[in-house]
Image: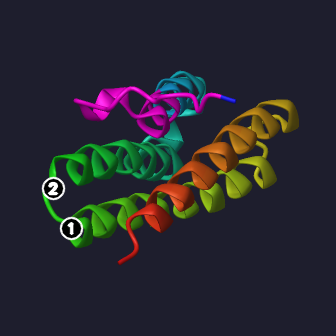
Amino acid sequence: MEKTQRKKAVSFTDLEVWQLGHVLVVALYKETEKWPQSEQFGLTSQIRRAVISVTSNIAEGFSRTTKGDKRHFYTMAHGSLTELQNQLLIARDVTLLAKKDFDTLADQSVVIHKLLTALIKSLKD
């Protein structure tokens, strides 16, 4: 059986984990636009910063030359994603997010979490 060849990523945008993260960024921006103005400097701001941090750290990690540097930024993205998951739980529990919307966004975050975990493990010395 022939092993499937993966195309070498030449840009951070080629990484599946970044692509799925970007989809999550866009989805959360659209979702948080619906939230009350009173949340603009609260949970809305926190969620947007956390989700942007995920894809930004993936992008920065991709550009680094050593495994250690790459792993550091991918680990930072992992931490921001965990922060985001916590904020999604809060948004659900204070009824800013409907259960259906929470489930969709949380499921997306779990897939990204698994991909980031695999990426970090692949860079172990």
Q: Residues within 10 Å of mark 2 (few under 14, many from 20)?
A: some
Work out whether residue 121 or residue 1 is closer to the camera in this orientation and state it.
1
Residue 104: percent from left, percent from top: 76, 33
Amino acid at dot 1: Asp
Q: Residue at x 23, y 30 (%)?
A: 11
In the rendered image, the quadrant that contains the C terminus is bottom left
From where the camera sits, is residue 19 visible?
yes
Residue 59, image quadrant:
top left
In the rendered image, the quadrant that contains the N terminus is top right
User: Which region shows up in magenta?
Assistant: 2-22
Residue 108: percent from left, percent from top: 67, 38
SS at mark 1 in the image: helix
Amino acid at dot 2: Arg
Marking on residue 64: 2
Q: Residue at x 16, y 47 (%)?
A: 63
Residue 40, image quadrant:
top left
Marking on residue 69: 1
